[in-house]
Amino acid sequence: MATEKYYVPESSPWPLAASVGLFLTAVGGANFIQQATDPDTFQGSWGMPLFFVGLATLLFIIAIWWRDTIKESVGGLHSNQLGISYRQGMLWFIFSEVMFFGAFFGALFYTRWLIVPWLGGAGSNAMTHELLWPSFQSMWPLVRTPDGTTTQAMGAWGLPAINTAILLTSSITLTIAHHALLEGKRGRLIAFQGITVLLGIFFLGLQVEEYIHAYTEMGLRLDAGIYGSLFFMLTGFHGAHVTIGTLFLFVTLLRVIKGHFNEENNFAWEAGAWYWHFVDVVWLFLFVVVYWL
């Protein structure tokens, strides 16, 4: 019985380099967000340039890393055993993303059903309410904070509902593209995957429009109390994931055009599809919990 060789990739500097880029992006982004909420310290902030330096570094490293991996794949170096490792790795990665968003949803639930009622005097905390914030009203969305800051709640049936329809449609078009890949129908695959990428871009464009509306017309900002913080944290991180997913699908679309995939050798394409469907499912939970309820 013939044994299959297991290909072990050569040592690569890209994981360490990508970690540096990610670290610079995180530190710069956190500093920029912190200073952006304080006009007195925003001038001369080093957070924004550091964020873009880190982001550019990260994107450059990812591009080189993907290039090397693609060369290994089209060069016939990948084996079935390595494919199993890739699938396991992708599943663990998506599981880590579930935990990532689970922590943020947990913060939302904890705030909504425990902290806000507690501040409003629920349970045995009537004395705390009377002494600290007697005028505070327990409500959600929390459009009036204990210190008197007011904002408006983002409704569900405007741009958020349109974006929900866009993402649901994108899951359908990507599923059609997947079936086309498995059936060897390359033209249909390119067409429907291209539509999926465009829908992802439309989603991001409408989210930018939503943020502009929130900041300029609703007073819904990062510093607008716990509701504003949770709103932008959940929707912002989801938007970042949509950006990554759109880029992922665009790269695999280019590879489809170049003929890199077939009915049997297509895991890189499927990994992008798994990620995209995960992002869509997260948005459905987010739409219901953040916008609707």
Image (cartoon, rainbow, N blue to C red):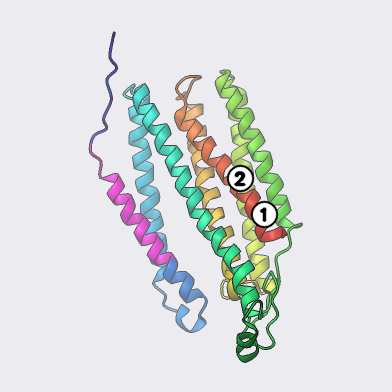
The kind of secondary structure element at disc 2 is helix
Q: Is residue 9 visible?
A: yes
State whether residue 26 is above or below residue 12.
Answer: below
Q: Which residues are magenta?
A: 11-29
Residue lying furthest front? 124
Most foreground residue, 34 or 198: 34
State whether residue 89 is above or below residue 75.
Answer: below
Position in image of residue 50 (x %, y %): 38, 65
Residue carrying label 2: 281
At x 60%, y 52%, the residue is 204
Number of residue marks: 2
Residues marked 2 and 1 touching at CB (< 8 Å): no
Location of residue 14 by image quarter: top left
Dot 2 amino acid type: Val
Residue carrying label 1: 287
Residue lying furthest bottom? 131
At x 68%, y 50%, the residue is 163
Dot 1 amino acid type: Phe
